[in-house]
Image: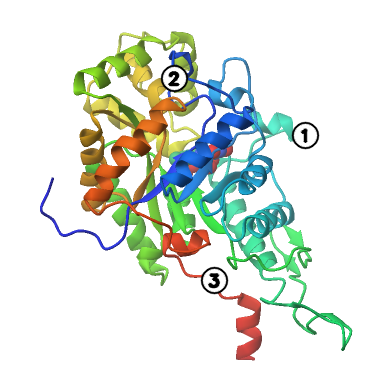
Amino acid sequence: MSKQPMRPVPMRLGLFLQGAGHHVAGWRHPEAESGGENLPLLRRIAATAEAGKFDLLFLADGLTTGADAHPSTIARIEPLVLLSALAMVTRQIGLAATASTTYSEPFHVARVFASLDHVSGGRAAWNAVTTSYARSAANFSRGEHPAHDERYAIAEEFLQVVRGLWDSFDDGAIIQDKASGHFIRPGALRTLDHAGRYFSVKGPLNVSRPPQGHPVVIQAGSSAPGQRLAARTADMVFTAQQTLEEGRAFTQGLKQQARAFGRDPDHLLVLPGVCPVIGGTEAEARALYAELQGGIDPAAAIRLLSDRLGHDISGFDLDGPLPDLPESDQLQSRARLLTDLARTQNLTLRELYYLVAGARGHRIVWGRPEQIADALESWFRAGAADGFNIMPPFFPTQFERFVEDVLPILRRRGLARTDYDGPTLRENLGLPRPANAFSRQAAAE
Ligand SMILES: Cc1cc2nc3c(=O)[nH]c(=O)nc-3n(C[C@H](O)[C@H](O)[C@H](O)COP(=O)(O)O)c2cc1C
């Protein structure tokens, strides 16, 4: 590989844990075992990820389903419940769950993630999403899904409230001093008294300050308002990028924005998703990829692409080019990425939907273990990523191949960690523990 100087930190690795695999037809492979509700399997995958020293297990989440949804999203255990169970059978791996800022209350979110951080000894992360699909509104007694930019305005305030609630207690506030009769140190717990445009939250939170100060905050959403939110407040960004140039522009642009907000750009980690299809030889990997693509149901693929573009494409000529569509209110960044891909590669609608159905717009790499390692290394060294969210096409064997065959190559190249740095996710990711905003304010007064 390249002779560029090695980056001083290891590649950060998340495992995108989708019970039926990431490829829409992955579950049909003879080796695949599936199930978003198959706890023994999920436990085995978590153990493999921890043995491979992955930084975190990452659970995406949605709030609607249907028989024609992606098989990994049809039926699955609620993420916080699943991660609480997995916290009991793992010791060091980070535990990231998705929760929506559009369809939750800040008090609930602050409470459950603070609780997961306590339960896991400082390994919790919250993937804050604004929820793309308008049909989610129908499950929450809401007439309408808020518009794209308003969802981000809500998210800004939501995050501010959650962080404020996590600071309700000073660190070490619960002293249980039997002699003085003070269960909690006097003055160490206070209300938030937030009254904003969208939320009114008195506080305090009824969970003490999380071991990490604040659980790691991940942001997924790559449009301009999504990037602004991340640059200001997130510790990590999960994104979909197709080419090294786009990945580099996105990652460096985001770090530049973080710098403009007065932040250390190394404290905003960018992890694009990658779906590695691994074979013992290049020919074997190509055959496996072809087999997976051959299993795609065209109707499901059209639905997936329609979702990603934010428009129903079923009525268009599948062997013609992608039509000009108005800007989507759902997933703006993904719709733009797919439109660019179709235009630059001259893809027909059919070719585009096969590409998207494979990995839902995330980058697919197929090859021998060395080729997979090369594909990750080139992005990492070029500053196109701080690491990757690994999205195996199916479980468990494709993921086991990654851990057994690809990771040792990355380790030999000095790119992947050989052990955890500490007990908390923040320590392993090289992220600082946030100071308590209230304590800091009180000290200054
Ligand atoms: C890589 C990525 C992952 C996402 N994961 C989720 C998810 O798990 N659940 C969800 O409801 N929305 C998810 N979203 C949707 C975003 O939260 C947001 O609602 C949507 O992308 C619109 O924002 P954007 O136009 O800024 O990308 C994801 C978006 C991206 C880009």
**Mark 1 or mark 3, which is nearer to you?**
3
Is the residue under label 3 in contact with that under label 2 (CB below 8 Å)? Answer: no
The Cα atoms of the two marked residues, 1 and 3, are separated by 36 Å
Q: Position of residue 6 (x, y in %)?
A: 20, 58
Q: Type of residue at label 2?
A: Gly
- Indicate left or right for 394 with 66 as reference: left
Within 8 Å: ligand 1 and the Cβ of disc 1? no
Question: Can you tell which mark lies on residue 434?
Answer: 3
Query: In x, y percent, where is residue 48?
Result: 46, 39
Q: Amino acid at mark 3?
A: Pro
Q: Which residue is painted at 41% across and 21% down in the image?
A: 357
Question: Disc 2 versus disc 1: distance between alpha carbons?
Answer: 35 Å
- Mark 1, secondary structure of its residue: loop
Q: Is mark 2 within 8 Å of ligand 1?
A: no
Q: Residue furthest left?
A: 3
Q: Which is more toward the observer, 317 or 183? A: 183
Look at discs 2 and 3 and give the one toward the viewer: 2
Residue nearest the viewer, comparing 384 with 335: 384
In front of the other: 118 or 66? 118
Q: Marks 2 and 3, how far apart in space?
A: 40 Å
- The residue to which callout 1 is attached is 141
Specify the farthest residue to the bottom.
Answer: 445
